[in-house]
Image (tube, rainbow, N blue to C red):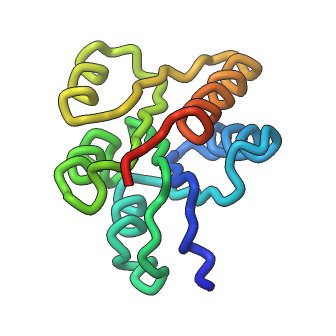
């Protein structure tokens, strides 16, 4: 079986420190078994739509997408716009995890169909707690449509 067939969380984050903490927290809390980390919105879209480096990955979709807002090449807003406008991906829950407190980013994210908008705390422990809460809600408590 292809290693990308049963992705639970697809995580787009360009900051390696934030990514490491998030991945470690999700794994330690046993929130998700299979998490794929991509480093920007372009890579995320290639993964989801099985193109570029991911053209041969199979066609399994993630159960949830964690998406950073400010990333190189394709930012979170543009990636969200593509995800929510495509019939194949519009039902995948997308959680924007960002350091942006800007109201315009929040409003634009919800206008485009984000399922949740979480501002990353600057404190290490609070950041880990926030990741845990998001993961538990979206992977354990929330029910998605088939």
Residue 136 pos. (x, y %): 64, 33
Image mark count: 0
Which image quadrant is residue 133 in?
top right
User: Against 23, is 99 above or below?
Assistant: above
Residue 6 pos. (x, y %): 57, 67
Could you tell me which residue is drawn at 32 percent across and 15 percent down? 102
User: Against 69, is 92 above or below?
Assistant: below
Work out whether residue 3 or residue 78 is closer to the camera in this orientation and state it.
3
Work out whether residue 52 or residue 89 is closer to the camera in this orientation and state it.
89
Could you tell me which residue is drawn at 40 percent across and 42 percent down? 93
Q: Is residue 84 left or right of residue 41?
A: left
User: Against 57, is 101 above or below?
Assistant: above
Q: Is residue 28 left or right of residue 123?
A: right
Could you tell me which residue is drawn at 70 percent across and 43 percent down? 31
Which image quadrant is residue 7 in?
bottom right
Residue 83 pos. (x, y %): 27, 52
Which image quadrant is residue 112 in?
top left
Residue 145 pos. (x, y %): 37, 47
**Quarter of the image with the C terminus in it:** bottom left
User: Against 16, is 57 above or below?
Assistant: below
Work out whether residue 146 or residue 86 is closer to the camera in this orientation and state it.
146
Could you tell me which residue is drawn at 36 percent across and 68 percent down? 46
**Quarter of the image with the N terminus in it:** bottom right
Q: Is residue 26 left or right of residue 11?
A: right
Work out whether residue 29 or residue 19 is closer to the camera in this orientation and state it.
29
């Amino acid at each position: 079986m292809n290693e990308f067939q049963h992705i639970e969380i697809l995580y787009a984050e360009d900051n390696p420190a934030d990514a490491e903490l998030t991945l470690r927290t999700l794994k330690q809390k046993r929130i998700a078994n299979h998490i794929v980390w991509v480093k920007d919105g372009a890579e995320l879209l290639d993964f989801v739509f099985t193109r570029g480096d991911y053209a041969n990955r199979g066609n399994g979709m993630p159960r949830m997408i964690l998406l950073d807002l400010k990333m190189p090449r394709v930012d979170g807003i543009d990636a969200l716009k593509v995800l929510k406008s495509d019939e194949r991906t519009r039902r995948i829950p997308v959680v924007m995890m960002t350091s942006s407190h800007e109201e315009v980013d929040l409003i634009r994210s919800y206008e485009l169909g984000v399922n949740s908008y979480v501002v990353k705390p600057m404190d290490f422990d609070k950041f880990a707690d926030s990741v845990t809460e998001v993961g538990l809600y979206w992977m354990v408590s929330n029910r998605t449509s088939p």
